[in-house]
Image (cartoon, helix red, strand yellow):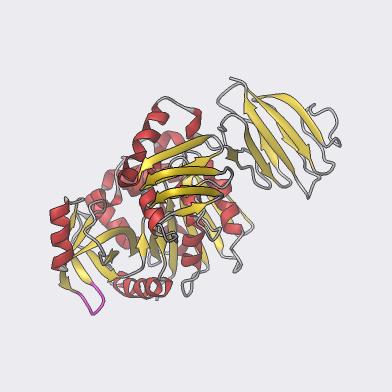
Amino acid sequence: MSTLIPCIIAGGSGTRLWPVSREAMPKPFMRLPDGQSLLQKTFLRAVGLPGVDRLLTVTNREVYFRTVDDYRQLNKGNARLDFILEPFGRNTAAAVAAAALHVSQLYGDDAQLLVLPADHLITNVEEFSRAVTAAQKLATEGWMVTFGIVPTAAETGFGYIEKGPALDADACQVARFVEKPDAVTAQGYMDGGLHFWNAGMFCMRADAVLQELRTHAPDVLNAVSSCLASSPRKEGNRELQVELDSESFALTPDISIDYALMERSEKVAVVPCQLGWSDIGSWQAVRELSPVDAQGNYCNGEAVLHDVSNCYIDSPKRLVGAIGLDNLIIIDTPDALLIADGRRSQDVKVIAQELKSSRARAMMPTVCTAPSRVRGAPTRCSKKASVSRSSALWFARRHHSHCRCTITAASTGSWSAAWPPSPTASVNSCLIPTSRRSSNRGSRTGWSIRASSTW
């Protein structure tokens, strides 16, 4: 069977999960109760598939370093890591086109691409592996295969896939893709047995998807191809980075792979499966995955509750006291607090969108990351943000003119600027112009930077 290259698509900010998920700390990095992020769980599912020894990720370049950190913690099999780094999001058609071109050029036209969203949860990994094997068989024949989740509820928040004629014992041709239905229609879909949730996962040969893009979305393919041709590459330590050129990438149409290709092509198949799947699209979805007490409450952190039922409380740093509440979602972070009616968890995006339009600091995380051997740390941090990683070169490039930093050097090292005056001191504080950088090249134990902008 052809080489299988899992491709993790990590885009979007997950506005329905504010304040934990934010623009510079998006949903894939959200930690579940077991300590692993959604991205890490997707990574483990991908590299755990038979025969997989390399993985491709398409993500925003601003979160590349955190992505690498998440992978390195779990990459016990030393899988090769390829990255396509976007300067900004242009939707999934551009991401899939870039991935298909990359795989075709490096691993052959017959290599199979397994497209996986970074922020979905699958609990039945055995069934996932079976479904991928079934999809690979059809992909070898030139089909673009999607995975249809057998619905467990009349869900109005998902798109649906209607099945057509059977292709084999495991799959059918797709009759059509259906937009998010109303409640009555969704119930009919569930009762009828002909429709599945669209999970946004695909398996297809690189040459097959490129041919279909030439037919149905040539503007997307041509724009992405031109962009890749002018984009620099770096390679080393079994990692390859392709940083997409901003100017040419801006010319790429902003359209989803469903609209651009899947809804137009006649070569789309579906493998029905029961994966224990969730897109973790709201705090209600998170709550459904969490164990509750006799009153239906989930509490992460210390809480004193009286006459409280069916509440989801996440406050790991601060005591919560509550009286006479029912069906609330309470999320406490160091700089923002969310209190929402449990029946309206989808509306959290309204708050996030309003904060984004006003450029509020609450859309930035309180912790930014500058990993090892990094030149070019995250470009934006909120007030009092902290940056901490081992033996690194941290380049203070900011949208504002200065950052106030407190630098803690765990051991001696050399500084590339005239500050801090004593690199052997345990703590130094200074005002850093945008063009300055700090480096503790000699340290293995590392340093941390605590930064607050002066605007």
Residue 449 location (% of width, % of height)? 70, 36
Q: Nearer the viewer, residue 7 or 112?
A: 7
Q: Is residue 6 above or below residue 325?
A: below
Left or right: 381, with 4 as reference point = right
**On the rendered structure, is 450 left or right of 331?**
right
User: What residue is drawn where x is 24% and y is 56%?
Assistant: 155
Q: Quadrant of the N terminus?
A: bottom left
On screen, residue 419 above or below 390: above
Q: Report the front residue among 108 and 89.
A: 89
444 lies above or below 268: above
Q: Position of residue 380 (x, y in %)?
A: 55, 32
| Rendered location of residue 172, percent (x, y) | 20, 71
Residue 220 falls within the magenta-colored stretch = no
Q: Is residue 129 above or below residue 214?
A: below
Q: Visible in this render: residue 385?
A: yes
Q: Name the residue at 72% across, 47% down.
A: 390
Taking the image as shown, residue 158 lies to the left or right of residue 227, namely left
Range covered by the magenta-colored residues: 167-171
- Quarter of the image with the C terminus is top right
Q: Quadrant of residue 410?
A: top right
The x and y percentages for residue 369 are: 61, 42
**Residue 169 drawn in magenta:** yes
Q: Residue at x 67, y 42 (%)?
A: 388
Secondary structure mostly seen in the magenta stretch:
loop
